[in-house]
Image (cartoon, rainbow, N blue to C red):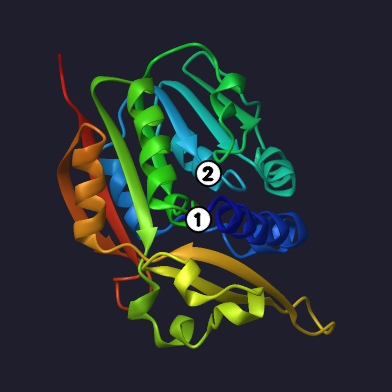
Amino acid sequence: MRQDIFQRLLNINREFYQSFGQAFAQTRRRVQPGVRRALAQWITNGDWLDIGCGSGTLSREWRSAGLKGSYTGVDFSQPLLKEAAALQQNPLESDELTVSFLQADLTTPDWTSVLPRRMYDGVVAFASLHHIPSAAYRKQLLDTIARMIKPGGLLVLSVWQFQHSPRLMARVLPWRLADMAEEDLEEGDTLLDWRYHPGESGAAPGLRYVHLFTPEELQALARKTGFEVVTAYESDGSGGRLGLYQVWQRAAL
């Protein structure tokens, strides 16, 4: 992917989350069933990193599950991080779990500089990887993440499968609305409309870039970055197929 196209796709999502971050957070306060399943089956005590933590909803579930160790959430959107802090009704530290939020842009080379110097027992990345443009950059990002995970540790992720929702497919827009040509994009790159109805003030439209992954594409990405796919499942939405979840394990020494 050309660098200028990469930057323009980034700008679409940056503008969306800066403009609609608080409104978007209001629509994402419920933990998805697929995330709950992952939390129950795969998340263990230890030090975990949440990439694309958004408004911090998962951190509350983490505490409610009685997990011990540390939870560090990172996101680039200041409005969402403010929402994350506001959602915390209780102190963020206890003898058993430390919760913290940090601002970091995964699409910048130095995004890890804000993180504590440690290896993580696991990383979660729910509904975040599909907002990262460029297959080459996604591999680079996952190479970085792999080096942050202890041998044998897990990466638990999900990506959007909006092709299973007629309502969401109706929101797919032509790339000319973003002044881009189809041939400049990679297969699976999609422009989606998002609307929020704040009471009586009408609809406030926004644009989002999303990459539509195939299961095979994700599995290949795991292999290329030194992971083994332990399990995969579909969940979420009215038909239970709106999210594709995969659990990756880093090779043990």
Give the amino acid type for the residue marked by disc 1 in the picture: His
Q: Which mark is residue 131?
A: 1
Instruction: Give above or below for 212 relative to 226.
Output: below
In front of the other: 63 or 194: 194
Q: Quadrant of residue 146?
A: top left
Q: Quadrant of residue 251?
A: top left
Is residue 161 toward the left or the right of residue 89 in the image? Answer: left
In front of the other: 227 or 23: 227
Instruction: Give above or below for 75 relative to 205.
Output: above
Q: Earlier in the sequence, mark 1 or mark 2?
A: 2
Labels 1 and 2 touching (C-beta < 8 A): yes
Q: Residue at x 47, y 42 (%)?
A: 61
Counting the numbered discs, the total is 2
* Element class at badge 1: helix
Q: Which mark is residue 152?
A: none
Q: Is residue 39 visible?
A: no
Q: Residue at x 40, y 36 (%)?
A: 140
Q: Position of residue 104 (x, y in %)?
A: 62, 34
Q: Position of residue 176 (x, y in %)?
A: 61, 81
Give the amino acid type for the residue marked by disc 2 in the picture: Gly
In front of the other: 199 or 224: 224
Q: Is residue 7 visible?
A: yes
In front of the other: 63 or 48: 48
How far is disc 1 from disc 2 in space, using C-alphas?
Answer: 10 Å
In the picture of the structure, the residue carrying the numbered disc 2 is 52
* Element class at badge 2: loop
Q: Position of residue 43 (x, y in %)?
A: 31, 34
